[in-house]
Image (cartoon, helix red, strand yellow):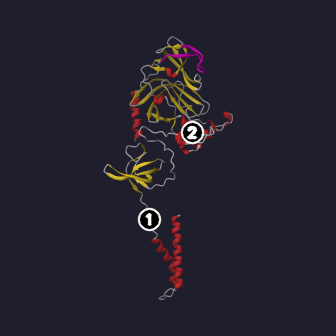
Amino acid sequence: MRKTLTALRLFAAWLICAQPLFGQDVYFTNRAETLYERSFSISIPITRLDEGTVITHIGNVRHTFDWSTGESVTVFLVEVQTESGLTGWLAADAVSIRDSVALPERITENLWMHSYYLDVLQSGYMERLFEHEPFWHDGYDPRMVNGWPWYHIASPNTIRFSNVFVRIQELSYNSHWFINGRVEENDGSYFVHATYARKSISFSGHFDNYFSEGEDVKFALQPDGDFLDVFVDGIRIFTLVKFDSEAERQFGNLMNWRDEPFDISRIVWPRRADGTMDIPPPSRHSGFESSHLTTAQLRVRDEPSTDSLIVTTLDADAEIQVLETGSVETIGGTTASWVRVFTAKGFTGWAFSGFIELIAVEPEAPYPVIAEALEEQAAPIAAATPSGQPMPPLSAFVAVAVAAIAVVLLVKRKKK
């Protein structure tokens, strides 16, 4: 329901922000910056542009590396033409769009990866990536890259957003570049009017034929805590998550990029703004065995307190496993204890037990079976005994023993 309402709200905002803007935007330098001659070098300056210099055209985007500080720093450059006719390459973050909302730093300063990498990391198995990117299992040929195994090549698909470009990196070597027009904001979502500028393809990927060069594209970006939902024409195409240096390092360790052990505990597990998680974090508990049912919608929290962050929300009649019992509290007139639970989807946290009930287990009813077995065993013995005479003691013992053995065998078979 929450996702449906979000999609409807985004579609309504989309209609508000859907007027054509391409070709109407005015770019300018937001600071004094050097114009360079070639995109692959930032050491051949042409001239120094003043702040406020009008840029009449942006043609392309590339990235290079700046070694001036002694370390490799990635620098993104855009190909520009100024109002006076100068052409060259300019640092992308030195360009702004007039009458445009600036994307917040929480979007532009992060490298975003697809959220399914959390599932890969949580599993602890590199082959889990095949479920999300089947190319590495079905289409990768080591001969393409000097015999390297797939797991040494498979770096995460990432997306970078800036105020003037969007870059989608896919299957390690494929790049898709978009030039941004005006950016608008509505109800916390950001609408980016962009043009698909170019692509650089090495492998056959999902987005090869998704966009056409020169096509106008409208991105809707909805930040939500550590997540970023991306829509095109009102359809969600990506759910992204912040990709920090530690997550990148542990992904590399999982893929055997370096001689370091994989340690998922070093990753700060991402959460949405309300504290919930799309994918459960690693848990020491395994082997789900349901013991209780929820009687209403129930929040599972980090700690046994209504002030604690929500881990996930369970629907009514959801099966859970109670791991331990905590403190007693009265909530909404109901007095009950907090219990630590393990859910069927793998989330662990604390829930208020006033809204759960024990799963009823019907007791085994062996007595009719025993009686039936006794009758079956006693019938031939009774038939062999003369009428009106008591059964010999030895025969009685044998009858009881046979009946007992039969009952034991039946009980064991039922348990299996």
Return the x and y of residue 119 as percentages of the image width and height.
53, 42
Looking at the rendered structure, the kind of residue marked 1 is Pro
> What label sits on residue 48 in the rendered view?
none
Q: Residue at x 57, y 43 (%)?
A: 128
Q: Which residues are magenta?
A: 31-47
Q: For the residues marked 2 and 1, what is the alpha-carbon distance in whole angstroms?
A: 49 Å
Residue 98 versus residue 109 in the image, above or below: above
Task: Name the element at disc 2.
Answer: helix
Query: Circle 2 sits on which residue?
Result: 250
Task: Name the element at disc 1.
Answer: loop
Image quadrant containing the N terminus: top left
Q: Residue at x 54, y 16 (%)?
A: 34
Q: Residues within 10 Å of mark 1 (few under 14, many from 20)?
A: few
Q: Nearer the viewer, residue 214 or 82?
A: 82
Query: Which is closer to the viewer, label 2 or label 1?
Result: 2
Q: Residues within 10 Å of mark 2 (few under 14, many from 20)?
A: many
User: Is residue 44 highlighted in magenta?
Assistant: yes
Residue 5 versus residue 36 in the image, above or below: below
Q: Nearer the viewer, residue 114 or 31?
A: 31
Q: Nearer the viewer, residue 210 or 120?
A: 120
Return the x and y of residue 293 as percentages of the image width and height.
41, 53
> What label sits on residue 363 in the rendered view?
1
Return the x and y of residue 151 as percentages of the image width and height.
62, 39
